[in-house]
Amino acid sequence: EDQVTQSPEALRLQEGESSSLNCSYTVSGLRGLFWYRQDPGKGPEFLFTLYSAGEEKEKERLKATLTKKESFLHITAPKPEDSATYLCAVQASDYKLSFGAGTTVTVRA
Amino acid sequence: EAGVAQSPRYKIIEKRQSVAFWCNPISGHATLYWYQQILGQGPKLLIQFQNNGVVDDSQLPKDRFSAERLKGVDSTLKIQPAKLEDSAVYLCASSPGTEAFFGQGTRLTVV
């Protein structure tokens, strides 16, 4: 069974304090690893797709990286508007999409 | 491009009543997912459709939940009868094959 584990569960940062979120996974036939952002009361918003080990994607203050066993989401110099829950998901060879429990990030001004 | 549409946004029902949720995916997306998200947890897959065929429904409580996808486009998810533990947000997502795009969800409260 595909498994996705995210850590830490919660992260409190001061504005400008960079940090990383971890997503470790086991999946049969990885088609892709996805990062999403979810704000309270809303559906997950797509951020990145990573397909193979060594791949990196960047968007504003966010950078996602992938190895054969885990992915990291680096937040550089975060701002209060980066506060959200960040979800990691893996897509298996049968297109099944499995999510982790998420990391809730709070950035204080 | 229009996103995934879901309705209703909110629903409050009494236990043992029935409820239905509707999803209109992004045009042309072959894959459609229904997820259940309990407060503080990640989304849990209930059912996955490829066009109008079921690919995975292993985590769907089939004694009370049912879903269908009409003509490979719109989908409905039904709960009958509802239990207190069904209180959650029900998310619909569609995908052209890789990344999935989500609707705003339906928040169900069972009292």
Image (spheres, coloured by chain):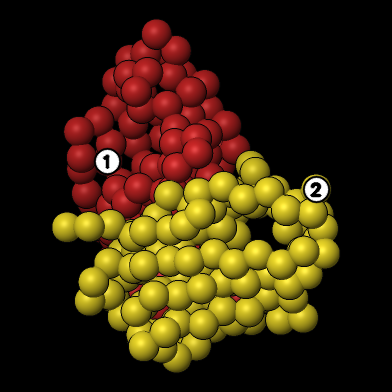
Real-space CA distance between mark 2 and mark 1, rounded to the nearest whole angstrom: 42 Å
Quadrant position of the N terminus of chain B in the picture: bottom left
Q: Position of residue B54 (x, y in %)?
A: 50, 88
Please report the residue visible at 61 percent of the width from the left and 76 percent of the height from the top.
Answer: A1
**Where is A41 relative to A92, above or below?**
above
In the rendered image of the structure, the colour used to display chain A is red
On residue A97, the disc is none
Left or right of A79 on screen, residue B92? right
The kind of residue tagged 2 is Val
Q: Is residue A60 left or right of residue B111?
A: left
**Could you tell me which secondary element the residue under label 2 belongs to?**
loop
Numbered tag placed on residue B111 in the rendering: 2
Which residue appears at 48% of the width and 78% of the height? B48
Q: Please, what is the three-letter code of the amino acid marked with disc 1? A: Lys
Chain B's colour is: yellow
Q: Is residue B36 in view?
A: yes
